[in-house]
Structures are given as C-alpha cells and as structure tokens.
Amino acid sequence: MNRLLAGFAIAQAIFVAALLVLRAGAPSPAAGGLLAPQDPSASWEPSVPVRPGWTHIIIHHSASATGSAAHFDRIHREKGWEGLGYHFVIGNGSMTENGRVEPGERWLEQRDGAHAKAEWNSRAVGICLVGNFEDTNPTPEQLASLEALCRWLMRRCGIPAENVLRHGETHGNQTLCPGKRLDVEGLRKRLGASR
C-alpha cells in the first residue's frame, strides 16, 4: 500500500511540474532545458539565394477580419493563381498568432508576387496584414512585426525607406489598400530615421 501511495505522489508531482512548465511557456527538461528565444527572422530566410532586383516593399491589408497565409493561399488558388499572391502575411490573432509573420512560398522560392500590377510584382515584396484597416486599427503586435520585417527586408535586399509603399501608392492602382488606419507614412519616417 505504501508503494502505491508513493507512486501516486510521484505521479502527481510529475504532473504538477509538467503543468508549471507548460504554463510558464518553457521547454521541458527532456527538450534540453531552457532555450534562448529564437530570432523570428530565421524563418524569413528564403530556401534559395535572395535574388537581385527587389527594389520596393508594398504594404497591403486583407480587407477581411480573419485570415492567414494558408487561408489566403487557398482563396488565391481558387481564383486560378499559383498560390498565395503575397510574399508575407502578418496575422492578427484570428487564424494565426497576433503579429506572427508567415513567409509565403513566393518569398521562400524568390518568385514574383501576385499582389499588385505586373510591373510591380517582379520587383516589389508584398506584405499583407490581416484586417480591414478602413474600419479597424492594426494591432500593436502587427505594427511591431511589420516594422521589424521591413527593416530586415531593407537590410537584406538594399531597399531604401522611401520605397516602402502603400498598395494605393503604386501607379495604376485605384485602391484604398491598406486602409486609412494603417500609417505607412509614419512607418517610412521611422524606417528612414534609423538608417
């Protein structure tokens, strides 16, 4: 009986310890102990060398309350496109984590986008933030991720801050995208001030 009670007490202690580890968000000891948080830009590196010729970054909104790279990929394929038209999608917490940057196959394989007019798709990296910024504000997490991603792309591709554009700023596009509540001008100023 004593062995049974001791075994039960040990099992409870292991269960409580596992719950505490999960609640703290730390990896389990079996995973090698505590790990430093990984730089998110590691997942942004393409699977092939970055091609020359990326000259601009175009910012979009999804004009929808929910979404993710996988969701938009499915929608774009249904339209007959070769998958997700954007190079990156930044989640709002609806279908992926709030502020999570999802690189698409077009970026990972260094292919033209399908997010603007043809003359832009071959030279502009397309970033879509999930949300309708005519009606709501982007989340602080989305804005922080957008700025970090733009800084990384600027360094990685040699893109100047003045070439970070709203979709509506590209010639020939009569669109409100990415919405009046996403301050791309302020973003450009912050990006330019730190160079």
Image (tube, helix red, strand yellow):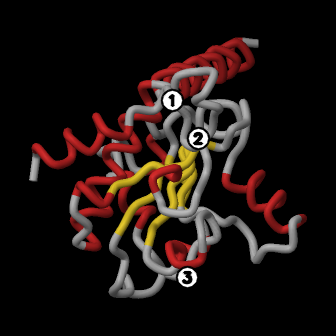
Q: Which one is in front, 100 or 55?
A: 55
Residue pictured at 51% horizontal, 55% vertical: 127
Asked whether, in this view, residue 190 is left or right of residue 93, the answer is left
Q: Which residue is mark 3?
A: 111
Please report whichever mark, 2 or 3, sits nearer to the chain's N-terminal start: 3
The relative height of residue 94 versus residue 174 in the rendered view (above or below) is above
Disc assigned to residue 180: 1
Relative image position of residue 126 (x, y in whole percent): 51, 61
Disc assigned to residue 176: 2
Dot 2: element? loop
Kind of residue sitting beneath label 3: Arg
Disc assigned to residue 46: none
The relative height of residue 19 versus residue 107 in the rendered view (above or below) is above
**Distance (Cα) linking label 2 and label 1:** 7 Å
- Circle 2 or circle 3, nearest the eye: 2
Quadrant of the drawing holding the N terminus: top right
Residue pictured at 55% horizontal, 82% vertical: 111
**Distance (Cα) linking label 2 and label 3:** 26 Å
Please report whichever mark, 1 or 3, sits nearer to the chain's N-terminal start: 3
Asked whether, in this view, residue 159 is left or right of residue 192, the answer is right
Dot 3: element? loop
Kind of residue sitting beneath label 1: Lys
Kindly indicate whether the residue at mark 3 contacts the one at mark 2 (C-beta within 8 angstroms).
no
Kind of residue sitting beneath label 2: Leu
Relative image position of residue 88 (x, y in whole percent): 53, 58
